[in-house]
Amino acid sequence: MPKPLGDLLPPYLAIAAAELGKGQPVTVQVRPDAAAVGRALAEAMFQAILERAAEPQGATLIVPVGPVEPFPLLAEMLNHRGVSCRTTVFINMDEYLTDAGDWLPRVHPLSFRGFMDREFYARLDPALAPPPAHRVFPDPHDCAGIGALIAARGGVDLCCGGLGINGHLAFNEPPEPGVSLSPSEFAALPTRVLDLSRETRTINSVTVGGELSVIPHRAVTVGMKEILAARRLRFGCNRPWQSGVVRRALHGPLTPACPASFLRTHPDASLTVTPVVAAPPDPHPR
């Protein structure tokens, strides 16, 4: 007799919401909706900034564009409390590249630099905002600059982000077929330029109505090395399609085929998700 469909799927996909993350070193929290997940990440960034606001050298953060919800909330928190982040350095995880290998122009609708300008930096009280030199993106023409900056600042206090459909962290994609990397080799990958996977380009095309042709083929990304060396990791997931990858990251094999599984190697990592992500995927949708 044929096995039920559920028996043919990886066992981790059947893990109940209440069991998500049990037995793993990553703390899992469930929040009511995307706004609440965004607020949890905004609060983590705010706390990291506040902890070092009085020091001559403020906090150093690695931050994403995706989830996108935290940044207006963080600006609101900083403005309301009058907390300066002029000594804070914000290192964005990644940026799309043109075919010529340069950053997308800020005016491009998909530019992460443009997003940060609109949704975070422009919302801050100018007296509290970080200077332009502290608004950092990995430079495709000087990838080593990120590692040098982090070393000069004594490390990264906090790294926030989300999980890609193939488990990528930032744009650290799983190795392509035929490419073999050991877990230690993959974890040591630094900031670099790379080709985006078909899976990443496809899921990211939902931001432009599914028009895959406008999604760039190349990007520059902060490396696994820099992410995993951060003192704290705070990641959030709020999309229905993340239910499976969250389970794979927490309960599947620890492997470069799922970069997010490396969260389990970190001493202080947490994942905040919505109820739809916490619920196991239904192989028999109604």
Image (tube, helix red, strand yellow):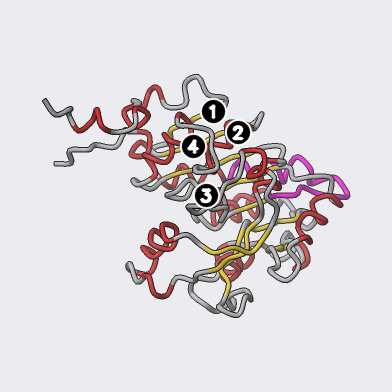
Is 108 in front, or is 10?
10
Which element is circle 3 on? Answer: loop
Q: Tell me where residue 157 appears, x and y as whole percent.
A: 73, 42
Q: Which residues are magenta?
A: 42-61
What's under tag 3, amino acid-wise? Pro
Using the numbered discs, state the Cα–Cα distance from disc 1 to disc 2 in whole angstroms: 6 Å
To which residue does mark 1 refer? 27
What's under tag 4, amino acid-wise? Thr
Q: Tell me where residue 61 appears, x and y as whole percent.
A: 70, 49
What's under tag 2, amino acid-wise? Ala
Is 196 in front, or is 40?
196
- Tag 2 near tag 4, CB within 8 Å: no
Residue in the picture at 58% in, 31% down: 264
Q: Residue 58 colored magenta?
A: yes
What's under tag 1, amino acid-wise? Thr
Q: Tell me where residue 122 appears, x and y as whole percent.
A: 62, 68
Q: Quadrant of the C terminus?
A: top left
To which residue does mark 4 refer? 272
Side (left or right) of 216 relative to 95: left
Side (left or right) of 257 relative to 49: left
To which residue does mark 3 refer? 174
Q: Can you tell which of label 2 and label 4 is closer to the viewer?
A: 2
Using the numbered discs, state the Cα–Cα distance from disc 2 to disc 4 in whole angstroms: 10 Å
Q: How many other residues sit within 10 Å of disc 4, few (<14), some (14-19) or many (≥20)?
A: many
Q: Can you tell which of label 2 and label 3 is closer to the viewer?
A: 3
Using the numbered discs, state the Cα–Cα distance from disc 3 to disc 1 in whole angstroms: 23 Å
To which residue does mark 2 refer? 269
- Tag 1 near tag 2, CB within 8 Å: yes
Which element is circle 2 on? Answer: strand
- Tag 4 near tag 1, CB within 8 Å: no
